[in-house]
Structure formats: structure tokens, C-alpha cells
């Protein structure tokens, strides 16, 4: 099950509705894979000599997701 499927099932919404609403609110759902691909697309661009994210892209994705989780976690 993908993260998107799990989120929609948990929120009991029609397929695609949850992510559409989040996107309209300026938010995104990211996993290490989608974040790595986004980093690759932005920083390597269309002129890259490779089409898939590198290990460096994946490391950056992991670091970004960890930082987002820290900053979005409820403060106690």
C-alpha cells in the first residue's frame, strides 16, 4: 500500500481527494523516494547526465524529511 493509499484510507476519503486537498492548501505528501526525485529534478535539472536520484539526493531527502518532521511535531 502506498503512503497516498494509506492516508486516503485513514481519512476515509475518495481516491485522490486527500492529496488534492493538501495540494490546494500548499502542502505536499513526501516520502524519501518522492523527495529524492524532487531534489534531483530541482538541482540536477533536465540536463543531468543521469535520470534517477543519486545517493546524495537520497541523503538530502532523508535529512529534509527528518527536519520537516521535527518542525511539524507537536511541541510539548
Image (spheres, rainbow, N blue to C red):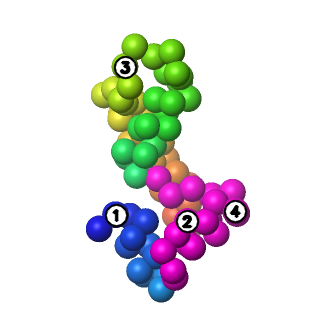
In which quadrant of the rendered image does the N terminus lie? Answer: bottom left
Say which residue label 4 marks. Answer: 24
On the rendered structure, is 68 left or right of 2?
Answer: right
Mark 2 neighbour class, 10 Å CA radius: few under 14, some 14 to 19, many 20 or more: some
> Residue 43 location, x and y as percent?
53, 24
Q: Quadrant of residue 18?
A: bottom right
Numbered label attached to residue 19: 2
Q: In terms of secondary structure, where does tag 3 sit?
A: loop
Residue farthest toward the bottom in the current orientation of the protein = 12
Q: Residue at x 48, y 86 (%)?
A: 12
Residue beneath disc 1:
2
Q: Which mark is residue 45?
A: none
The span from disc 1 to disc 3 (Cα, nearest Å) is 26 Å
Quote the CA–CA distance across marks 3 and 2.
29 Å
Dot 3 or dot 4, earlier in sequence: 4
Magenta span covers which residues? 13-30
Amino acid at each position: 500500500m502506498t503512503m497516498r493509499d494509506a492516508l486516503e484510507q485513514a481519512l476515509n476519503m475518495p481516491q485522490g481527494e486527500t492529496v488534492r486537498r493538501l495540494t490546494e492548501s500548499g502542502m505536499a505528501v513526501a516520502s524519501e523516494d518522492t523527495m529524492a526525485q524532487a531534489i534531483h529534478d530541482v538541482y540536477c535539472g533536465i540536463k543531468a547526465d543521469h535520470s534517477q536520484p543519486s545517493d546524495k539526493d537520497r541523503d538530502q531527502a532523508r535529512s529534509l524529511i527528518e527536519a520537516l518532521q521535527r518542525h511539524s511535531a507537536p511541541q510539548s
